[in-house]
Every structure is written in C-alpha cells, then in structure tokens.
Amino acid sequence: MGVPRHPRPVKPFASVIFKDRRCFDACIPSLEKAIGPVEEVSAEMPFDHTSYYEEEMGSGLRRAFVLFKGLVEREGMHRLKVLTNGVEGLFLVSGKRVVNIDPGYIALEHVVLLTTKGYTHRIYLSQGIFADLTLVFERGSFRALPWTYPDYRGEHVITLFNGWRERYKLELRGAECSRA
C-alpha cells in the first residue's frame, strides 16, 4: 500500500500574449497583486505558431513569460487560472482581450499549464479549470509530448524552462533546509 505524501511546492509562471507592449507592462502590477512579485520576465518573442487569437487580438502578436518569486502549494492551483482570467478582464477593450494570460507551474518532473479547455490529456481540477501536462523532464532536459503546443516545443522555450527549473531547484533546496 502506498503512503500518501505531501508533494513539493512548485514555481508559478505565466505566459502573456499581447500586441501592444504597453498593455503587457500595464498588466504586470495586476499579476503581482494576484500571484505575487515577479522574479523574471523573459525576452519578448513573436507569437506566430497559430492564428487562434488574431480575430480577437489582431495580428503581430508577441509573448513573454513571467516567472514569479516564491513557491506555492499544488493544492488549489486552479485558482491561478481563475485569478489570471480576472486580470484579463481588467484589460478588455470593447469586450475583447488585449492580453491573454496562461498561468502554469514548474515542478522538478514537469511543466503544467492551467486552462479552461478540456481535452483527452487534460485533468479536471476545479471551478472549470484543467491541468495540461505540457513538458516532462527526462535525460537532463524538459521534453515535449505529442500534444504539447508547438510554441512550447521550441528550443528557446525549452532552454528558458530548463534554466527556470534550475533556479526552482535551488529555491526548493533552500526551503527544505529551512524546514529541517
């Protein structure tokens, strides 16, 4: 019989898709209020793997990833998506989003996105939110799965998440030492 154990806390992040950098900059204080202080913002990159958001947000979309300070417990992770949906709602223009925010978390073993869209590989959490296993850590690096979004498969994104995993690992060790 397996003995249930409390899992390690995880490192929250968010992907923010936007057209106008000023909208991205304006949403950061609201994200910090909802999730916590920002630790790092990635370089801006084109969001050109899909046209899914163009009807609502226009063309020429960009993306940046935001890493948050501190560790959070896995229980209640669905709340991150509820909170970021609220932040998106603060920045509607004529009923349309100017920022699309997709939160998730980094664990030693994987990267998980939080979404409102169910699918065969997504696990329901609560309040209409699903967990999407996006990357798994194998042989020293995060790796894509058959259903991983194309933009999360890119070398630049994998390198970013590998670096953030190393930072998370150090933070996790520090948290475990302080509890000992």
Image (cartoon, rainbow, N blue to C red):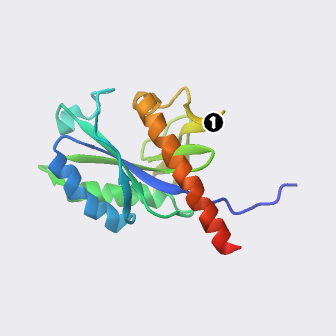
- Residue 9 visible, this orientation: no
Residue 75 in the figure: left or right of residue 94: right
Q: Is residue 36 above or below residue 88?
A: below
Placement of 12 over or under 18, stated as above or below:
below
- Regarding residue 123, the answer to whether it shows in the image is yes
Report whether 39 appears left or right of 88: right
Give the residue type at disc 1: Gly
The residue most toward the left is 94
Which secondary structure, mark 1? loop
In the rendered view, tell whether residue 39 sits above or below residue 106: below
Q: What residue do we see at 59% from left, 54% from top?
A: 169
Indicate the quadrant containing the C terminus: top left, top right, bottom left or bottom right. bottom right
- Give the image location of residue 152, x and y in percent: 44, 33
Judge whether 75 appears above or below 134 on screen: below
Q: Position of residue 70 (x, y in %)?
A: 48, 64
Q: How many marks?
A: 1
Residue farthest along the bottom direction in this orientation? 179
Disc 1: CA contacts within 10 A as few (<14), some (14-19) or many (>=20): few
Name which quarter of the figure residue 168 lies in.
bottom right
Horizontal and vertical percent position of residue 121: 56, 36
Which residue sits at x=24%, y=57%? Answer: 27
Choose between 10 and 146: the one closer to the eye: 10
| The N terminus sits in image quarter | bottom right
Question: For the view shown, which residue lies furthest in the right direction?
Answer: 1
Report the residue at 55% width, 26% height from top. Answer: 146
Label 1 sits on residue? 140
Task: Identify which residue is drawn at 48% across, 35% down.
Answer: 158
Tell me if 32 is positioned left or right of 153 in this view. Answer: left
Q: Looking at the rendering, which quadrant does residue 54 occupy?
A: top left
